[in-house]
């Protein structure tokens, strides 16, 4: 079983940048096919933001963040990152990382989340 810990959230002005990190312990990310970032804003459902296939590194993004966010991985450090640029107030949410055992499978291990607040 993997434990996931997110960090890097905070308060930033619109147009600013943040880099979120997701650290895995207990198991390496290599054990899982997919690592994803999700977010949930107050009163809204959780939504997928970005994902990366551990082997091969292919990525996907929600339309709302394409061109602004970049997901990446560091095999040696067993870390996954979400670089967020040109942040908007509507990006305000709790951001979670999660793992899935296969592409298309349900994400079944989740971190505790990190708060991102973008002020206008």
Image (tube, helix red, strand yellow):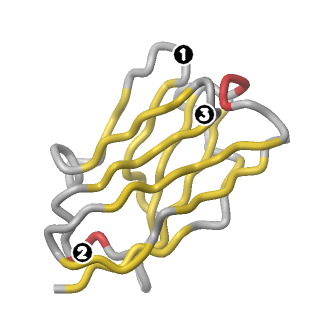
Crowding near pointer 2: few (<14 within 10 Å), some, many (20+)? few
Give the residue pinned by disc 2: 90
Q: Earlier in the sequence, mark 3 or mark 1?
A: 1
Position of residue 5 relative to residue 105, above or below, is: below
Q: Secondary structure at mark 3?
A: loop
Give the residue pinned by disc 1: 55
Position of residue 84 relative to residue 39, above or below, is: above
Position of residue 36 relative to residue 30, above or below, is: below
Q: State if disc 2 and disc 1 touch (CB < 8 Å).
A: no
Give the residue pinned by disc 3: 105
Q: Secondary structure at mark 2?
A: helix
Res 38 label: none
Give the percent coordinates (x, y) of residue 28.
73, 30
Q: Quadrant of residue 16?
A: bottom left
Q: CA distance from mark 3 to mark 2?
A: 28 Å
Q: Which residue occupies 56% across, 31% down?
A: 34
Q: Which residue occupies 70% across, 43% down?
A: 24
Q: CA distance from mark 1 to mark 2?
A: 32 Å
């Amino acid at each position: 079983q993997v434990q996931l810990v997110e960090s890097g959230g905070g308060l930033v002005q619109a147009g600013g940048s943040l880099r979120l990190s997701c650290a895995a312990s207990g198991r390496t990310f290599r054990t899982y096919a997919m690592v994803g970032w999700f977010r949930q804003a107050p009163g809204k459902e959780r939504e997928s933001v970005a994902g990366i296939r551990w082997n091969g590194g292919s990525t996907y993004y929600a339309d709302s963040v394409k061109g602004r966010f970049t997901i990446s991985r560091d095999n040696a450090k067993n870390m996954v990152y979400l670089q967020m640029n040109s942040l908007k107030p509507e990006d305000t949410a709790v951001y979670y990382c999660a793992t899935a055992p296969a592409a298309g499978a349900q994400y079944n291990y989740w971190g505790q989340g990190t708060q991102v607040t973008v002020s206008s």
